[in-house]
Image: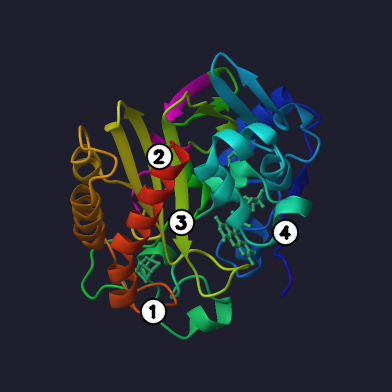
C-alpha cells in the first residue's frame, strides 16, 4: 500500500515545530515514530497535507527526575522507557504497559510515548483498507451517519486501545501540551474526551511535549494487566490498571482504570472508592470492587474488536482483580 502525497516538514527545534504547527496544524499531522500514523495514512484513514516530523527534536527525548516526579519527553522511544531503572523499580504498572506495546521492534526502532497516548481510537469496521470501506456506507467516524458496532448509535463508539493511557491515568500522571505561545498541563484523564471520532482534547496547534508521573513513596503499588490473543504485536482486548496506597494494613487510596473497552480509558470512581479503608487482605472487598468495575465498565462496551463482546465483558472483573492483587503485592501487602 502506498502513502498518499504530503508535504514533509522537518523542524530543527521545538520553537520551530510549534510555529509550524500553529501555521499548518489544522491540515497536518505530527509524525513521531509513525507506527500508528503511517498505517492509518496507508489505509487512507488520514490524509494530512503536511507531516511535521519530530525526528530532530532531541529536546523531547529525555527521562529525568524532578521534585518527586519522573518527567518523560513525549518523543522518548518506548525501549528507553522500558530500560529505565526508575520506571522498572518504582512504576510497575507503567513498565508492564509500555513493555506490552506492539513488539520489541516497535518499541526499539520507532514507537514513542507521546505517539502511544495520542494514537487514534480503533474499531474493526473502520481500521480497514480503503477498498474494504468502499464496499459499504460510511460510519460516523468516516463522516457518515451510521455505526456498525452498535445498531442505531447516534455517535462513534470506537475504542481507545492505548496501553500507556490506563496505566498513566491510574498513576495520576499529567501531560504538558504546548502551542506557539501557549502551555497547559492537564491530568492524563483530561487528555481523553471519550468521543469516538475526536478522542483527544489536544488542539491541532498543540504538541504533547512532556509526561509527568508522580514517583510513589513507601506503601504504594501499581500493576497493569491485559488480555490479548497473542503475547506480542497485539492490541489489548481488555486491560486494567490499579494503584493502591496502603497505611497501617488498610487501603488509604485505590484507583482502578479499565482500558480497551470505552472510547477513552475508564476511571472507575465508585469501584475505587469502595476499597478505601478496607483491609488489604479483605478478599470480599477485592471481589466486590472487581465485580463493580465489571458492571460499570461493561456498560460502555460495543462489539468492535476482534473478540466476542460477551467474553470481553466477562474478562473485565478478572483483569481488574489481577491488577488489584498485583498492585497490593507491589505495595508490600
Ligand atoms: C503491529 C502493531 C501493533 C501495535 N500494538 C500496540 C499495542 O499493543 N498497544 C498500543 O498501545 N499500541 C500499539 N500499537 C500502536 C503504536 O505502535 C504505539 O501506540 C506507538 O507507541 C505509537 O507511537 P509512535 O511514536 O509510532 O506514534 P505515531 O504513529 O508517530 O503517532 C501516533 C498519533 O499520535 C500523534 N502524535 C505523536 N506524537 C505526538 C505529540 N508529541 N504530540 C501530539 N500528537 C502526537 C500523531 O500525529 C498520530 O496521530 C501497535 C502498532 C502496530 C503497527
Ligand atoms: S464504533 Fe461505529 S462509528 Fe465508530 S468506527 Fe466503529 S463502526 Fe464506525
Percent coordinates x, y for residue 125 in the rendering: 43, 75
Percent coordinates x, y for residue 59 in the rendering: 74, 26
Q: Residue at x 29, y 65 (%)?
A: 301
- Please report whichever mark, 3 or 1, sits nearer to the chain's N-terminal start: 1
Indicate the secondary structure of the residue bearing disc 4.
helix
Indicate the secondary structure of the residue bearing disc 3.
strand
**Depth check, front residue: 149 or 331:** 331
Query: Per the image, is 185 magenta?
Result: yes
- Please report whichever mark, 2 or 1, sits nearer to the chain's N-terminal start: 1
Q: Are marks 2 and 1 in contact (CB under 8 Å)?
A: no
Residue that numbered label 3 is attached to: 225
Disc 3 packing (10 Å; few <14; some 14–19; many ≥20): many
Residue that numbered label 1 is attached to: 137
Q: Residue at x 70, y 37 (%)?
A: 84
Percent coordinates x, y for residue 160 in the rendering: 43, 56
Residue that numbered label 4 is attached to: 104
Whole-Å distance between the Cαs marked 4 and 3?
18 Å
Residues rendered magenta in the picture: 183-202
Left or right relative to 89: residue 104: right
Whole-Å distance between the Cαs marked 2 and 3?
12 Å
Quadrant including the C terminus: top left
Whole-Å distance between the Cαs marked 4 and 2?
24 Å
Whole-Å distance between the Cαs marked 3 and 1?
36 Å
64 over 166 or under it: above or below: above
Question: Which dot marks residue 114?
Answer: none
Kindly tell me whether residue 151 is visible in this rendering. yes
- Please report whichever mark, 2 or 3, sits nearer to the chain's N-terminal start: 2
Indicate the secondary structure of the residue bearing disc 2.
helix
Q: Residue at x 34, y 51 (%)?
A: 195
Percent coordinates x, y for residue 90 in the rendering: 56, 33
The mark lying in front, picked from 2 and 3, is 3
**Depth check, front residue: 273 or 101:** 273
Amino acid at each position: 500500500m502506498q502513502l498518499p502525497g504530503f508535504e514533509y516538514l522537518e523542524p530543527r527545534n521545538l520553537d520551530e515545530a510549534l510555529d509550524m504547527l500553529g501555521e499548518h496544524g489544522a491540515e497536518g499531522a505530527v509524525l513521531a515514530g509513525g507506527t500508528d500514523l503511517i498505517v492509518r495514512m496507508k489505509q487512507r484513514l488520514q490524509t494530512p497535507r503536511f507531516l511535521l516530523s519530530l525526528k530532530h527534536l532531541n529536546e523531547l527525548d529525555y527521562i529525568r527526575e524532578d521534585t518527586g516526579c519522573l518527567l518523560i519527553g513525549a518523543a522518548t522511544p518506548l525501549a528507553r522507557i522500558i530500560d529505565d531503572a526508575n520506571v522498572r523499580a518504582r512504576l510497575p504498572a507503567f513498565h508492564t504497559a509500555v513493555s506490552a506495546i506492539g513488539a520489541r521492534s516497535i518499541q526499539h526502532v520507532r514507537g514513542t510515548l507521546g505517539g502511544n497516548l495520542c494514537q487514534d481510537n480503533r474499531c474493526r469496521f473502520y481500521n480497514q483498507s480503503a477498498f474494504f470501506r468502499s464496499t459499504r456506507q460510511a460510519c460516523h467516524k468516516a463522516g457518515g451517519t451510521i455505526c456498525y458496532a452498535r445498531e442505531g448509535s447516534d455517535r462513534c463508539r470506537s475504542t481507545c486501545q492505548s496501553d500507556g493511557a490506563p496505566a498513566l491515568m491510574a498513576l495520576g500522571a499529567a501531560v504538558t501540551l504546548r502551542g506557539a505561545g501557549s502551555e497547559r498541563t492537564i491530568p492524563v484523564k483530561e487528555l481523553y474526551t471519550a468521543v469516538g471520532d475526536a478522542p483527544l482534547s489536544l488542539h491541532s496547534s498543540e504538541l504533547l511535549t512532556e509526561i509527568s508521573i508522580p514517583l510513589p513513596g513507601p506503601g504504594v503499588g501499581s500493576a497493569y494487566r491485559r488480555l490479548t490473543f497473542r503475547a506480542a504485536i497485539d492490541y489489548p482486548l481488555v486491560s486494567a490498571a490499579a494503584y493502591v496506597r496502603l497505611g497501617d494494613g488498610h487501603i488509604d487510596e485505590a484507583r482502578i482504570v479499565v482500558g480497551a473497552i470505552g472510547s477513552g480509558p475508564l476511571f472507575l470512581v465508585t469501584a475505587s472508592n469502595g476499597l478505601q479503608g478496607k483491609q488489604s487482605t479483605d478478599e470480599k472487598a477485592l471481589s466486590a470492587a472487581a465485580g463493580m468495575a465489571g458492571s460499570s465498565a461493561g456498560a460502555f462496551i460495543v462489539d468492535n474488536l476482534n473478540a466476542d463482546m460477551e467474553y470481553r465483558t466477562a474478562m473485565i472483573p478478572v483483569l481488574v482483580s489481577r491488577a488489584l492483587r498485583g498492585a497490593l503485592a507491589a505495595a508490600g501487602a
